[in-house]
Image (spheres, helix red, strand yellow):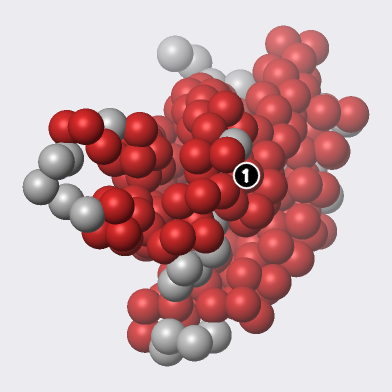
Amino acid sequence: MKSITKEARLTGLMYLAVIVCAGFSQGYVRANLFIPGDAVATATNIMENSGLFRLGLVSDLIAFILDAVISVMFYQMLKPYGKTLALISSSLRLLAHPAIGAINLLNHYMAIDVLTGMEMMTGFEVVEIQTLSLWFMNAHRYGYLLAGGFFGVHCLLLGIQLSKSRLVPVFFGVAMMIAGVGYLMETFGDFLFPGNEEWLAWVVGLSAALGEVELTLYLLIKGVKKSNLKTENQ
């Protein structure tokens, strides 16, 4: 029991690191440097803050590596309460960020690479290179949304698992399901109903704060409810 509680707290610690890293890269770096529809301003911001822009990429990569470990930790924690559902849920998390999200970082990197490697693009005008950089930033945003679709379903299933297992208070399971709905609303809403990106981003931010942040803090501080622990022979 002590081992499972320690693993839950370790999961909470890693989840907190993911939230901090992803919040920094998406909520600070790209939010301040990427100006939608303005290629010149975006390119200028990236070049004037190239170190910060690269740090945002590294921060995301750290988050995605940790997310791969968290996927396995959640599977180990929840498989006694439904092995198939735990496997599906963890697989979707692995696909969302460690797979799709990590590959999508190529778009983030190419946005600065085309600007710093202009001598290799002699056939392009400066404004065309800046437009290409903005195109890569747009591609990254869409890739982020695609990953969010997988992550949203993961959050829904994770919420169901947590509620059934009673390893944590039911509130946190319900909150994770709400977070999952928020991610899915943004992904499908942005693709199907353009022009609603701003308020959908608020929906994701608030639902993630309600679900992911609070679950993270509970795991970090409390671990799991020992009275509901199950063991499974390996």
Image-based side of 187 in relation to 14, left or right: left
Residue 149 appears in the picture as rendered: no
User: Which element type, helix, strand or loop, lies under badge 1?
Assistant: helix
Residue 143 placement (x, y as % from top left): 35, 55
**Residue 3 appears in the picture as rendered:** yes
Mark 1 surroundings: few (<14), some (14-19) or many (≥20) residues within 10 A: many
Q: Quadrant of residue 56?
A: top right
Which quarter of the rendered picture does the C terminus lie within? top left
Q: Which residue is mark 1?
A: 29
Q: Place residue 112 in its image quadrant.
A: top left
In the picture, measured across the screen, residue 211 lies left or right of residue 41, that is: right
Q: Is residue 70 above or below residue 197?
A: above
Q: Residue at x 50, y 39 (%)?
A: 47
Seen at 61% across and 77% down, the residue is: 198
Give coordinates of residue 146: x percent, y percent.
Answer: 36, 59
- The image position of residue 225, as x and y in percent, is 83, 34
Q: Position of residue 1 (x, y in %)?
A: 76, 16
Q: Is residue 234 left or right of residue 14?
A: left
The one of 17 and 50 positioned closer to us in this rendering: 50
Which residue occupies the foreground of this view, 40 or 32?
A: 40
Compared with 63, 115 (above or below) is below
Residue drawn at the location 44% of the way across and 72% of the way down: 37
Give amino acid for label 1.
Val
Seen as rendered, the residue at the extreme left is: 123
